[in-house]
Amino acid sequence: MTTETKPHTIKPAEGKLGVLLVGLGAISTTVIAGIDAIKKGRTKPYGSLTQMGTIRLGKRTEHRSPMVKDFVPLANLNDVEIAAWDIFPDDGYTAAKKAGVLNDTDLELAKTALAAVKPMKGYFDQNWVKKLDGNYVKSAKTKREYAEQLMDDIKRFQKERGVSRTVVVWCASTETFAQRNDAHSTLAKFEKALESNDPTIAPSMVYAYAALKLGIPFANGAPGLTVDTPALCELANETRTPICGKDFKTGQTLMKTILAPGLKARYLGLSGWFSTNILGNRDGEVLDDPGSFKTKEESKLSVLDTILQPELNPDLYGNIFHKVRINYYPPRGDAKEGWDNIDIFGWMKYPMQIKVDFLCRDSILAAPIVLDLALFMDLAKRAEFRGIQEWLSFYFKSPQTAEGLYPEHNLFIQETKLKNTLRWMMGEEQITHLGNEYYGM
Ligand SMILES: NC(=O)c1ccc[n+]([C@@H]2O[C@H](COP(=O)([O-])OP(=O)(O)OC[C@H]3O[C@@H](n4cnc5c(N)ncnc54)[C@H](O)[C@@H]3O)[C@@H](O)[C@H]2O)c1
């Protein structure tokens, strides 16, 4: 890749875009209801960079700041067709009711759109999500056969709904903690492992494999390994398909990646950061299992190190006590509460404290991310980008990066990276914020 300012050739967003969501739970139903409400003019796409964002082009004196959606050729919301898999047979309306994110009025207004989404049977393996026992699941002898069934689902969906392009976004439960192993190291080994039912191949990997085999972009909203293996990167490159992950950046981690860069920018020291959450939705129940929690914990813990760079700033950040807790507390439902106690120090090492009490709504924060990722991944595919899309780190707690590269967690650097990628794609100058041209230098 080069940094020259020549527009990329981007195929137009003609026809319909199919968005296949794995999991029809709290996030997915909130996405469906929200898109319906936006299309019908009942609300605006709050929280969505693709729909509400602007992008500055050229010098500040030029006053050029188009909407992102007018600058890059994104699919129109009216052309989006959504379907989902789940391991329970509830349609979108029933699932949304159970998820308890939306109030009764919004639920009823979106009833037709939600009820129209009847899930396709999922591929489930309880070894990977201990707290669930799905009864609406596929059956096959090998993981390769599961992959083929998923590919058949995708092709059927594409035909029945007449979509010209498709993306897949993992919005299903967090799987148990897994590390890369030999079966994930090359595509050939991965395919052999599918055939031999290797227990280290998670269902999410099989979904990702099915999508990538068909050249369909895959975004991973959960913290699991999923598409973050050399084998699936190889497949993505082979089929010239974009991939990205992991773990939607919402709630507490979003706040962490907003606050920590500020502390670091002013060289304020940090001695401890204690984060705890209470939440009572199904995601919280799944995370009550130590295996699933470990996957999430790893993802949540990783952010401070790369933002604060203790190896470069040992006096400020060399001895941080960082703790993250998630507590399943059913009365809260989806209305999570996240507390942070941050112990900082300044001049002459005088201690200070910051307390954050974020009464957030997880799925309300996650829904616009799903929409943006679906639209940007489709754009990336049409621009012939392939493999890991690091410019979409902005949306993830634990961004997937090239081998040997540390991820960038600072939200503001991530935003600059995303917007510079859009400028680069469209042949516009990158913005460095140097600004010396205004002062005759
Ligand atoms: N809400 C957030 O802010 C947020 C942030 C980051 C990551 N996430 C992750 O996003 C995912 C979805 O979150 P949610 O709140 O919608 O959870 P949820 O529990 O409400 O929904 C997940 C759905 O996935 C289904 N499912 C589980 N395994 C499946 C499989 N193998 N195939 C098909 N469907 C399957 C479940 O039955 C459930 O309906 C979770 O992994 C969560 O950790 C959420």
Image (cartoon, rainbow, N blue to C red):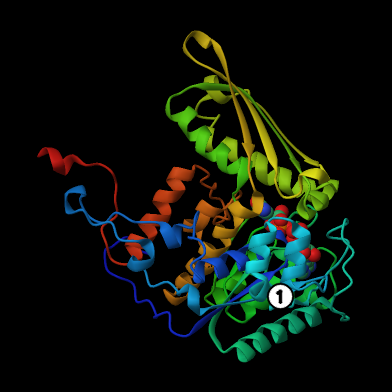
Q: Give the side of residue 158 with respect to residue 95, left or right.
A: left
* Image vertical order of residue 262 relative to residue 270, above or below: below
Exactly how many numbered labels are in the figure? Answer: 1
- Quick one: SS at disc 1? helix
Q: Amino acid at mark 1?
A: Ala
* Nearer the observer, 27 or 256: 27
Q: Give the side of residue 431 with respect to residue 215, left or right.
A: left
Q: Position of residue 17 (x, y in %)?
A: 53, 79
Going 76% across and 73% down the picture, which residue do you hit? 91
Going 21% across and 42% down the picture, which residue do you hit? 435
Q: Position of residue 414 (x, y in %)?
A: 46, 49
Q: Give the side of residue 205 with respect to residue 169, left or right.
A: right
* Image vertical order of residue 310 relative to residue 437, above or below: above
Which quadrant would the C terminus be assigned to in this image? top left
Q: Position of residue 183 (x, y in %)?
A: 76, 66
Say if residue 281 shows up in the picture: yes
* Nearer the observer, 36 or 219: 36
Residue tagged 1: 115
Question: Given the current orientation, which residue lies at the most extreme front position?
Answer: 105
Question: Given the current orientation, which residue lies at the most extreme left position?
Answer: 440
